[in-house]
Image (cartoon, rainbow, N blue to C red):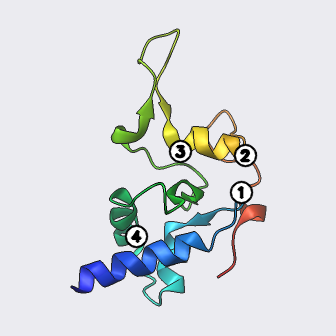
Amino acid sequence: TRQHRFHRAVFQKVKEVEPGMLTTYGAIAKALGLPNYSRHVGFALAGCDGAKVPWWRVINSSGKVSWRPKDRIGEGTKANPFKSKQVVLLEKEGHWFSETGTLAGWTRKLHEF
């Protein structure tokens, strides 16, 4: 189907983003020639296989992680608050976040398609 082909194209673009680098939903959409499809890129990534597609390297246009309830880690307690799996994976790749949740220096780490 057309949707399946679109999802595969999104996954291929995300695989091009090297460890330590980032991209945005909009940049992927633009690289696919569909600049108004950034939301659709997000929908595609919501259903991808994380073992094969490094979805965590895709952030929103504000330099922040888009919250995905199914990817939360922790108990939601004061001692062990919820944390985004995406944040954990990005931190493992050397990224860090400001107090407002923005990735520090994210504009200098953008992959160019």
Q: Which residue is mark 3?
A: 86
Q: Which residue is mark 2?
A: 95
Of the image marks 1 and 2, the number of the one nearer the N terminus: 2
> Which of the labelled discs sits on residue 69, or is there none?
none
Looking at the picture, how far across and down is residue 8, in whole percent?
39, 78
Question: Do the residues under discs 1 and 2 have CB atoms within 8 angstroms?
Answer: yes
Of the image marks 3 and 2, the number of the one nearer the N terminus: 3
Left or right: 109, with 42 as reference point: right
Question: Do the residues under discs 3 and 2 have CB atoms within 8 angstroms?
Answer: no
Between disc 3 and disc 1, the foreground one is 3
Of the image marks 4 and 1, the number of the one nearer the N terminus: 4
Q: Amino acid at mark 1?
A: Trp
Q: Residue at x 53, y 77 (%)?
A: 13
- Looking at the rendered image, the quarter that the N terminus falls into is bottom left
Looking at the picture, how far across and down is residue 58, in whole percent?
54, 60
Q: Residue at x 72, y 46 (%)?
A: 95
Q: Amino acid at mark 3?
A: Gln
Q: Which residue is mark 1?
A: 106
Of the image marks 3 and 1, the number of the one nearer the N terminus: 3
> On the image, which quarter does residue 110 sit in?
bottom right
Looking at the picture, how far across and down is residue 92, in whole percent?
69, 41
> How far is the residue under mark 4 from the one under mark 3?
16 Å
> How far is the residue under mark 2 from the one under mark 4?
22 Å
User: Dot 2: within a 10 Å radius of its alpha carbon, few (fewer than 14), some, or many (20 or more) residues?
Assistant: some
Instruction: Point out the residue furthest to the front here.
Output: 51
Q: Which residue is mark 4?
A: 41
User: Dot 4: within a 10 Å radius of its alpha carbon, few (fewer than 14), some, or many (20 or more) residues?
Assistant: many
Q: Residue at x 46, y 83 (%)?
A: 35
> How far is the residue under mark 3 from the one under mark 2?
11 Å
User: Dot 3: within a 10 Å radius of its alpha carbon, few (fewer than 14), some, or many (20 or more) residues?
Assistant: many
Between disc 4 and disc 1, the foreground one is 4
> How far is the residue under mark 1 from the one under mark 2?
9 Å
